[in-house]
């Protein structure tokens, strides 16, 4: 369910503000009934008529981007920095599903389908995310066990379901660790490693559920297949 003025604005017909005026002026009907209340929520099956014209719904689009470093996961930036939507060639109003930090690379989905995004970000769906972290220092078994037992972030216990030491570089005193988590807290992986005493130098998301960056160079993207979209929808409870 989304707010009526947002749905009208995201169809590309007009701005959010103009949509609000049209609603207040009684020029918007939902399923044949004039709606003048701004907070009204609608869903994708509702018929919306604006100024006697049926609102064409924007076709749903789904993308998988291999996000490069130095890019903001946002649809705008007031400081003029590069944003993830710059990489996707579309006029649809897509937005990122969840967030990766400015310096984090890897799997990022973008879509204009709010329901699809909700399925992948809602904690109840327990979506698996796999990250590869380069750490300053060489992690020990006790710290790996601690990450699996859980660490407190914002007074909530978060656990890694898997932690694997993949590579050790004695010369540079660094190591590569693969970590699997299910939540999506802000800076979660970096904060989890900080909690057990390690600074993350580099971070990449290798996998989000069924999605990986296979065959995609940094900055490249592809459309999801209908089958992939269907798989995500099958998680809806
Ligand atoms: N955890 C982080 O710390 N950063 C990200 O970008 C993603 C997960």
Image (cartoon, rainbow, N blue to C red):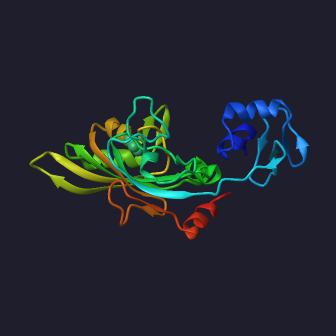
Looking at this view, is 235 or 22 the one in front?
A: 22
Looking at this view, is 88 or 184 the one in front?
A: 88
Residue occupying image coordinates x 51% and y 52%: 110
Name the quarter where the C terminus is drawn. bottom right
Q: Is residue 139 above or below residue 234?
A: above
Residue 26: image quadrant is top right
Left or right position of 234 against 56: left
Left or right position of 163 against 93: left
Looking at this view, is 194 or 205 the one in front?
A: 205
Residue 87 placement (x, y as % from top left): 42, 50
Q: Quadrant location of ligand 1?
A: top left
Residue 91 placement (x, y as % from top left): 55, 50
Q: Residue furthest left?
A: 171
Residue occupying image coordinates x 32% and y 60%: 217
Residue 101 placement (x, y as % from top left): 39, 40
Residue occupying image coordinates x 27% and y 50%: 141
């Amino acid at each position: 369910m989304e707010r009526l003025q947002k749905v009208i604005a995201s169809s590309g017909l007009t701005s959010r503000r103009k949509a609000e005026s049209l609603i207040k002026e009684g020029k918007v009907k939902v399923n044949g009934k004039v709606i003048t209340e701004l907070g009204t929520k609608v869903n994708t099956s509702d018929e919306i008529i604006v100024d006697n014209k049926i609102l064409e719904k924007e076709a749903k689009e789904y993308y998988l981007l291999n996000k490069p470093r130095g890019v903001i996961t946002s649809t705008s930036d007031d400081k003029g920095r590069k944003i993830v939507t710059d990489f996707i060639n579309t006029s649809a109003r897509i937005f990122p599903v969840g967030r990766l930090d400015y310096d984090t690379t890897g799997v990022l989905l973008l879509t204009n389908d709010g329901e699809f995004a909700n399925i992948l970000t809602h904690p109840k769906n327990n979506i698996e995310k796999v990250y590869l972290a380069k750490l300053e220092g060489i992690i020990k078994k006790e710290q790996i066990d601690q990450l699996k037992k859980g660490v407190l972030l914002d007074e909530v216990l978060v656990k890694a379901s898997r932690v694997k030491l993949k590579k050790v570089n004695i010369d540079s005193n660094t190591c590569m660790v693969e970590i699997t988590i299910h939540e999506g807290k802000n800076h979660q992986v970096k904060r989890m490693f900080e909690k057990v005493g390690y600074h993350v130098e580099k971070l990449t998301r290798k996998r989000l559920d069924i999605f990986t960056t296979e065959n995609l160079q940094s900055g490249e993207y592809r459309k999801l297949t209908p089958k992939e979209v269907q798989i995500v929808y099958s998680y809806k409870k």
